Image (tube, rainbow, N blue to C red):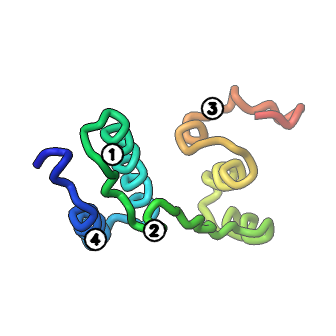
Amino acid sequence: MSVGEISPATVRGWRTDLLDSGISRNRAAKVYRLLRAIMNTAKDDELIRKNPCRIKGADKETETSRPVASVPQVYALADAAPRRFRVLVLLGAFTSLRWGELVNLRRCDVDTTAGVV
């Protein structure tokens, strides 16, 4: 299939197949925007007359909020965890450290006098 053979119906079918395969709507929106940008370049280069990516709203992502534990919930979780993981739970909740940084912390990385990690 050449660029000129891609119709709006082809694009709609492709997007439907993406969504039916289990891809998230946000991921589908990102992929659709990429295809639309490629097709805009093809139009600018006069390879096609019209961009076939014309699905209204297909490029929109919906922001999903993630649940956030309250401070009391974090302390309850830390208390419920095995003692050796208590500090890991607290640092994970109250710092901006990523998982790899958290699990690679050593005692020498923590200054309890200054309260600094």
* First in residue order: circle 4 vs circle 2: 4
* Frontmost residue, 99 versus 39: 39
In the shown orientation, is residue 10 left or right of residue 37? Answer: left
Residue at image position (40%, 44%) is 37
Q: Residue 5: horizontal and vertical position, in percent?
A: 15, 52
The residue labelled by disc 2 is 56
Q: CA distance from mark 4 to mark 2?
A: 14 Å
Helix, strand or loop under label 4: helix
* First in residue order: circle 3 vs circle 1: 1
Are the residues flagged by discs 1 and 4 in contact, CB closer than 8 Å?
Answer: no
Residue type of the residue flagged with mark 1: Met
* First in residue order: circle 3 vs circle 4: 4
Q: CA distance from mark 3 to mark 4?
A: 49 Å
Crowding near the residue tagged with mark 3, few <14, some 14–19, many ≥20 C-alpha atoms within 10 Å: few
Residue at the farthest top position: 108
Helix, strand or loop under label 3: loop
Residue at the farthest right position: 114
Of circles 3 and 4, which is in front? Answer: 4
The residue labelled by disc 1 is 39
User: Where the C terminus falls, by quadrant?
Assistant: top right
